[in-house]
Amino acid sequence: MRKISFLDKLTAVLGDTGGDSVLPCIQDLVTNGLQTSRLSPSDGVPNRQDVTQYLAAWSRVARLDENTCRQWLSEYAVALLASISKTSPSGIRHSTKSNVKYICSS
């Protein structure tokens, strides 16, 4: 059985025209997570919350509703962003929920 990627899940929730709104930078981030080795030493390394807020803001532009955004982004954050965080999976889910709520309401 083929494992469904986060990019496949995201494309599915976006619907028929959604795949067109997934920019290459979003595709890379959703597929590979944050690759700190690709950043220059002089760059500040974004933390998990920064990446979560970035993806939540993009999701809003892509017209995902808050609940759908929260669902896929929570799974993604626990699976791929936990490597840049010291927070537990339950803490990551809670923080993601709060971040999505904040971004969607602003």
Image: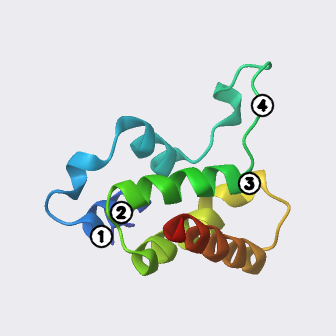
Is 4 placed above or below 91 here?
above
| Circle 1 Cα neighbour tier, 10 Å, few/some/many (<14 / 14–19 / ≥20) | some
Q: Are marks 2 and 4 in contact (CB under 8 Å)?
A: no
Whichever of callouts 2 and 4 sits on the residue coming sooner in the sequence is 2
| Circle 2 Cα neighbour tier, 10 Å, few/some/many (<14 / 14–19 / ≥20) | many
Q: Amino acid at mark 4?
A: Gly
**Tag nearer the camera, 2 or 3:** 2
Q: Are marks 1 and 4 in contact (CB under 8 Å)?
A: no
| Circle 4 Cα neighbour tier, 10 Å, few/some/many (<14 / 14–19 / ≥20) | few
Q: How many marks?
A: 4
**Tag nearer the camera, 4 or 3:** 4
Q: Residue at x 62, y 43 (%)?
A: 34
Q: Amino acid at mark 2?
A: Leu
Mark 2: secondary structure:
helix
Residue nearer the viewer, 35 or 47: 47
Whichever of callouts 4 and 3 sits on the residue coming sooner in the sequence is 4
